[in-house]
């Protein structure tokens, strides 16, 4: 049964063996190279639709965050494997996905408000009326495991507005392993952000793509106008851990209602910026609706929506 515009796993599996039209990469400029230069990265995003920014986390930092991630996945798996696998967007049952990240560890709260993630979000999404804060649209980890297949190439936006001609999300992948082609580095279709959603997502078209290879500790930045998907992990024994955050403008409905999902006690003492991003606010444009229906604990976490970052 389809859910909204989405296909369920069974349906997706049924349509993949069809004969498909192959679309070659039309982009003819040099592909973005891993860079530490933020201005270069912004130019890459504008030109090719994505950028790879290296050295955002030190070796000890990405290793520590990775360990937290795999420990959390193992903990969930021991309770029930369905909590971390068998997502309809994955080609088989091999990958592992983890949600509720801000509840789990400070690392995952810190990623969300990292100054670079916010700087690229401002670059991609532009200013908001009355400087109202952006919102975290979606947040999760994707661990590709040896032998897992390639995810279908897609946009991180609903088919209902594929043709909307501006980005409605900035996307940031935190690479907690080296992303190379063998382990299933995220595949991208360079320049596809300029197609403005003029694409065929029926399953009849196969978009050729390249692997966005990135050293561990990098971020890969793109928008919801770029065709992409997780690559197949053809390695024998290497996993690939990525944490993926999406940010949207305040007028866009986030996929996750974080204040109802997260533990209020975890959020106590967190920054105003983090709470703004996670939607613990009313609006900046007036017509304020106080959270009278919420618990005192939740109400105490609310902050003004005007961004100061
Ligand atoms: O894990 C990846 O490389 C990308 C995953 C992705 O695009 C998605 O789940 O929407
Ligand atoms: Fe995606």
Image (spheres, rainbow, N blue to C red):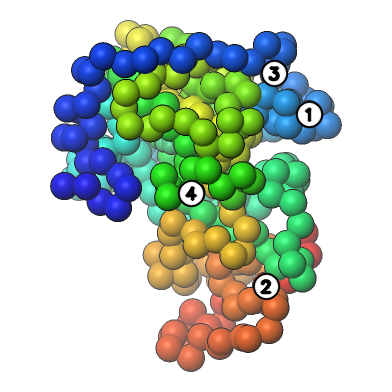
Residue highlighted by disc 2:
305
Residue highlighted by disc 1:
43
Q: CA distance from mark 2 to mark 3?
A: 35 Å
The earlier-in-sequence mark between 2 and 3 is 3
Q: Nearer the viewer, residue 307 or 106?
A: 307
Residue highlighted by disc 3:
32
The earlier-in-sequence mark between 2 and 1 is 1
Q: Position of residue 274 (x, y in %)?
A: 62, 61
Image position of 170 with respect to 294: above or below? above
Which residue is pictured at 51% across the width and 54% down the height?
A: 137
- Name the residue at the bottom extreme: 292
Q: CA distance from mark 4 to mark 1?
A: 25 Å
Which residue is pictured at 56% across the width and 72% down the height?
A: 280
Q: Secondary structure at mark 2?
A: loop
Which residue is pictured at 55% across the width and 13% down the height?
A: 25
Q: Nearer the viewer, residue 179 or 163?
A: 163
The image quadrant of residue 295 is bottom left
The earlier-in-sequence mark between 4 and 1 is 1
The earlier-in-sequence mark between 3 and 4 is 3
The image quadrant of residue 73 is top left
Q: Position of residue 226 (x, y in %)?
A: 56, 32
């Amino acid at each position: 049964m389809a859910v909204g515009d989405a296909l369920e796993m069974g349906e997706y599996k049924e349509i993949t063996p069809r004969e498909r039209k192959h679309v070659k990469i039309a982009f003819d400029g040099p592909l973005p190279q891993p860079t530490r230069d933020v201005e270069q990265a912004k130019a890459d995003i504008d030109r090719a639709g994505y950028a790879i920014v290296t050295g955002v986390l030190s070796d000890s930092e990405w290793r520590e965050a990775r360990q937290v991630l795999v420990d959390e996945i193992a903990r969930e798996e021991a309770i029930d494997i369905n909590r971390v696998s068998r997502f309809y967007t994955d080609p088989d049952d091999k990958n592992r996905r983890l949600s509720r990240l801000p509840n789990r560890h400070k690392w995952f709260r810190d990623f969300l408000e990292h100054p670079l993630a916010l700087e690229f979000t401002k670059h991609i999404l532009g200013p908001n009326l009355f400087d109202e804060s952006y919102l975290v649209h979606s947040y999760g980890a994707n661990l590709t495991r040896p032998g897992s297949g390639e995810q279908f190439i897609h946009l991180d936006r609903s088919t209902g507005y594929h043709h909307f001609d501006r980005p409605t999300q900035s996307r940031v992948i935190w690479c907690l392993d080296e992303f190379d082609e063998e382990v299933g580095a995220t595949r991208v279709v360079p320049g596809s952000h300029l197609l403005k959603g003029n694409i065929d997502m029926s399953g009849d078209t196969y978009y050729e793509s390249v692997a966005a290879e990135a050293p561990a500790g990098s971020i890969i930045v793109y928008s919801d106008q770029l065709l992409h998907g997780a690559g197949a992990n053809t390695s024998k024994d290497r996993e690939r851990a990525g944490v993926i955050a999406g940010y949207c403008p305040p007028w866009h409905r986030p996929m996750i209602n974080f204040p109802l999902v997260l533990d209020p006690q975890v959020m106590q003492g967190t920054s105003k910026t983090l709470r703004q991003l996670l939607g613990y606010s009313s609006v900046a444009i007036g017509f304020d609706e106080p959270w009278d229906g919420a618990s005192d604990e939740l109400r105490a976490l609310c902050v003004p929506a005007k961004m100061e970052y």
